[in-house]
Amino acid sequence: MVSAGRLGTVHLKRGWYLYVGSAFGPGGLAARLAHHLRPSERRHWHIDYLLDGRVVREVWYRCGARDLEHHWAQALLTHPAAQAPVAGFGATDCRCRSHLIGVVRGQDLAALKNLLSPTVWRLR
């Protein structure tokens, strides 16, 4: 069980999770990643609650002038192994089903990465 702010307590199955988001605020990508990759008392986004005490294995990112998180969420959820474990997670300001995508098997991550774009880069 994980507290997810206004979404309340959510139940997540064991597996791998991807979160899609954008970073157009002050400080851009560097500031957003710094916020998410270190423990923080200030939880602003749903992902802040999920990351509390958990390990981030990889960060895939793409720099550009266009907000692609909605397209990515939709593309990832077309994969048969992908699921939206929490409706509305990270997507309370849009019509996406969820910006949190889960898969049970780690092997499915490569397939999901290929769905996004050949210009997604691995940070870690």
Image (cartoon, rainbow, N blue to C red):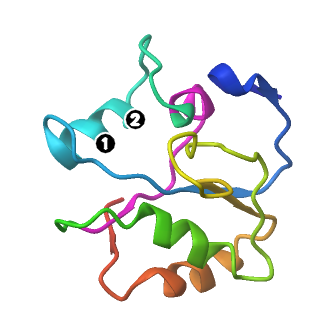
How far across and how far down the image is residue 109, in percent? 62, 75
- For mark 1, give the secondary structure: helix
The reply to whether callout 2 and callout 1 are in contact (CB within 8 Å) is yes
Q: Residue at x 22, y 48 (%)?
A: 29
Within 10 angstroms of label 1, few (less than 14), some, or many (20 or more) residues? few
Q: In this view, does 24 lie above or below 124?
A: above
Please report the bounds of the magenta region as a residue range: 48-62
Q: Which amino acid does label 1 sit on?
A: Leu
Q: Which amino acid does label 2 sit on?
A: His
How far across and how far down the image is residue 71, in percent? 48, 72
Give the main secondary structure, helix, strand or loop, of the magenta stretch: loop
As drawn, the label of residue 20 is: none
Q: State which quarter of the image contains the C terminus.
A: bottom left
Q: State which quarter of the image contains the N terminus.
A: top right
- Which residue has dot 2 on it? 36
Total number of numbered discs in the rendering:
2
* Magenta-drawn stretch contains 86: no
> Relative to 85, is 33 on the left or the right?
left
